[in-house]
Amino acid sequence: MPTFDNPSQDADELAQAARGLAYATRQIETPQETYYVLGSLHLALSRLQQGLQQLAAWHERNAPFAATDDGDRAAGHDHAVKAGGWLSVAAASTDQVVQLVMKAHSENGRIAWQSEAAPTRLAGLADVLAEREAALAPDPPASGHTSQGTGLTR
């Protein structure tokens, strides 16, 4: 469950959820679920992008307070600025992934998944026509000479 105030715990939970999704998508039993999975992935990636942007901004804002383990503030500042820059690049790169997943989600929404055993439209039409022919062509009389019950002869 997200905490909304503990980034370390929420990041760990995101990693575990991504692991579960990677495992679960190895075999998808219901093709229609792919639409919902792609929608959720689109949202997750958008939020991940936002998190990267916010981390980049945080590093840039807090660069003046950074130092290395040995107390070198100039080097700490440099590392914080570089980390913020890399995070900005990562966020910008994620934008392309977000857009591609959105396009895949849109295309997936146009699919009407069919089961492997589903008859084709023509095969279904052939079955219907065969049933109608059977209903219209009565069985010939047993004696071959008269229609039973009508008193008619051939």
Image (cartoon, helix red, strand yellow):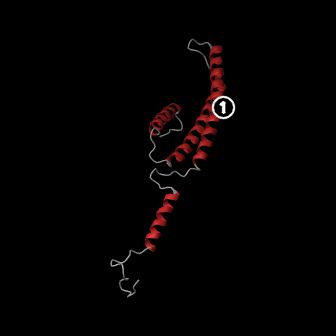
Q: In which quarter of the image is the C terminus?
A: bottom left
Residue 115, given in percent of the width and then of the height, sits at 47, 51
Q: Which residue is drawn at 47% across and 56% down?
A: 119
Nearer to me, 42 or 6: 42
Residue 78, given in percent of the width and then of the height, sits at 65, 17
Residue 21, given in percent of the width and then of the height, sits at 47, 38
Residue 116, given in percent of the width and then of the height, sits at 46, 50
* Up-down relation of residue 60 to residue 44 (above or below): above
Q: Is residue 1 left or right of residue 145?
A: right
Amino acid type shown at disc 1:
Ala
Q: Which residue is drawn at 53% across and 38% down?
A: 4
Q: Residue at x 62, y 18 (%)?
A: 79
Q: In this view, does 41 lie to the left or right of 143?
A: right
Q: Residue at x 63, y 14 (%)?
A: 75
Nearer to me, 80 or 20: 20
Picture mark count: 1
* Up-down relation of residue 72 to residue 49 (above or below): above
Q: In which quarter of the image is residue 95?
A: top right
* Up-down relation of residue 151 to residue 140 (above or below): below
Q: Is mark 1 on a helix, strand or loop?
A: helix
